Amino acid sequence: MKTKRRIRLTGLLCLTMLTVFLAAAAAAQTSLPDVGLITKLSGDVCFSNEAEKKEPAKVQAFMKVRRGDRLKLPEAGLLTLLYFASGRQESWKGPGTIIAGDTESATAAGQQPPSPPEVKLLPLKASRQMGGAPPVLTPADFGKSGIIQTMAPTCPAPEKAAAPMPRTYEAQRKIKEAEKLYQELKKGAAADDVTPELYLFGVLAEYKQFPEMVKMIDAMLEKRPGDAALKNLRASVRAQAAGGK
């Protein structure tokens, strides 16, 4: 009897594990990939995604964009969208609606098309680095479409940031390479384009170099004084540094 019961329990456990696995696999298949990042925003731009079946929401600064996102720009609305896989950086002016693809945007059928975008191509090494959220940041630091998570600190920002983590040889090599590419990106960037700083910030975040991360945010604030999202990000980085994360 005990043997039969053990067999039944084992079978039930396997069935439960299989159900969880299949559910997770189905969720992974239906989740939409992040394809780009909003690096500049002006005006009340809204987005929606038919696959998510949610009401349209307001686009946030530094929000990640998913494949199939419909971005509606109002009159005088502006946004710059960087695609991770192609390095294509598009600057759009409203009014009009665009749809995010894997490597570039398309105009929405039946909707007012915006003016053709200004397009720049960034090195793939830079755009792909920006494709993954730095592990040092909390989920609330960078927004994702369909969730609308803004850069907001999770605890009060300390006055003094913690010391950076010791750099390994690999970290030193990668940061040095990133700093070189950062200087190259700066040469072709507009006065208010923070993409070069976002790139180096991501590399520094990978190795939890908090003081230098704050310097990068300060550099972005010099380009965009008073930017609330950047101020919140600086507070969040300082808070995480103080927590030793």
Image (cartoon, rainbow, N blue to C red):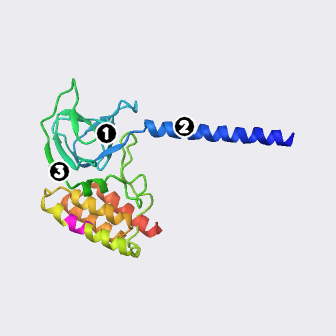
Above or below, 119 against 182 in this view is above
**Mark 3: which amino acid?**
Leu
Residue at x 26%, y 57% (from the top left corner):
125
Q: Residues within 10 Å of mark 3 (few under 14, many from 20)?
A: few
In terms of secondary structure, where does tag 1 sit?
A: strand
Q: Which residues are magenta?
A: 178-182
Q: CA distance from mark 2 to mark 3?
A: 39 Å
Determine the CA span between mark 1 and mark 2.
30 Å
Q: If you read the primary sequence from the N terminus, does the residue marked by circle 1 or circle 2 appear first?
A: 2
Q: Secondary structure at mark 2?
A: helix
**In magenta segment, residue 25:** no
Return the residue at label 3.
121
Q: Which residue is denoted by mark 2 in the rendering?
A: 23
Residue 23 is left or right of residue 16, and the answer is: left
Q: Earlier in the sequence, mark 2 or mark 3?
A: 2
- Tell me which amino acid carries mark 2: Ala
218 or 88, nearer to the observer = 88
Q: Earlier in the sequence, mark 3 or mark 1?
A: 1
Tell me the kind of residue under disc 1: Lys
Q: Position of residue 7 (x, y in %)?
A: 77, 40
**What residue did someone put label 1 on?**
58
- In the rendered image, which quarter is residue 222 located in? bottom left
